[in-house]
Image (spheres, rainbow, N blue to C red):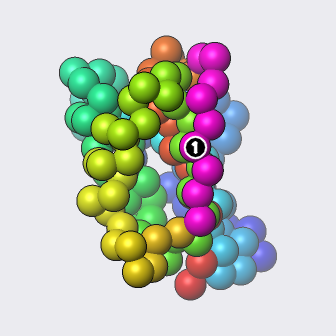
Amino acid sequence: MKTIITTKEAPAPIGPYNQAILNGNTLYTSGQIAINPKTNMLVLDNINSETAQVMENLKAVLTAANMTFENVIKVSIFIANMDDFTAINKVYGNYFNNENAPARETVQVARLPKNVNVEISLIAAK
């Protein structure tokens, strides 16, 4: 059974999609970028604060689905510049521990929505 997950604690979609879909016990999030849901403004001060906002947006979506980062089984990271990988990885690592970190891929792309530097989506399961 497909359930739409939505929260005001994460940015509203900027297109014809939902923040996340829960199918059975599996949650599929849409990609999150660094939009502050309270101001609707992008957080682009630096790659650290941008990544932290993305992760906080994902945390809000997980919370709306009654999950945490411990439920995450797969993460996809899209970055505009592979030179930012180390900084992104450091912030990202604050949300997981090595013992139960999810599977992941990181891909450099030509361009991301609203010209951001990082977009992250995930799959989680209860």
- In the rendered image, the quadrant that contains the N terminus is bottom right
- In the rendered image, the quadrant that contains the C terminus is bottom right
Task: Give the residue displayed 31% in from the left and 38% down from the top.
Answer: 87
Task: Estimate how packed mark 1 is, as few (under 14), some (14 to 19) or many (20 or more) residues with alpha carbons within 10 Å.
Answer: some
Left or right, residue 106 beside residue 53: right
Q: Nearer the viewer, residue 60 or 94?
A: 94
Q: Is residue 78 magenta?
A: no
Residue pointed to by mark 1: 106
Please say if 122 is above or below 49.
below
> Where in the figure is residue 57, as x and y percent of width and height?
38, 48
Q: Nearer the viewer, residue 1 or 55?
A: 55
Predominant secondary structure, magenta span: strand
Task: Give the residue displayed 30% in from the left and 29% down from the top.
Answer: 47
> Where in the figure is residue 38, as x and y percent of width and height?
25, 37
The amino acid beneath tag 1 is Thr
Task: Give the residue displayed 33% in from the left and 58% down from the top.
Answer: 93
| Residue numbers of the magenta segment | 103-111
> Where in the figure is residue 5, as x and y percent of width and height?
55, 61
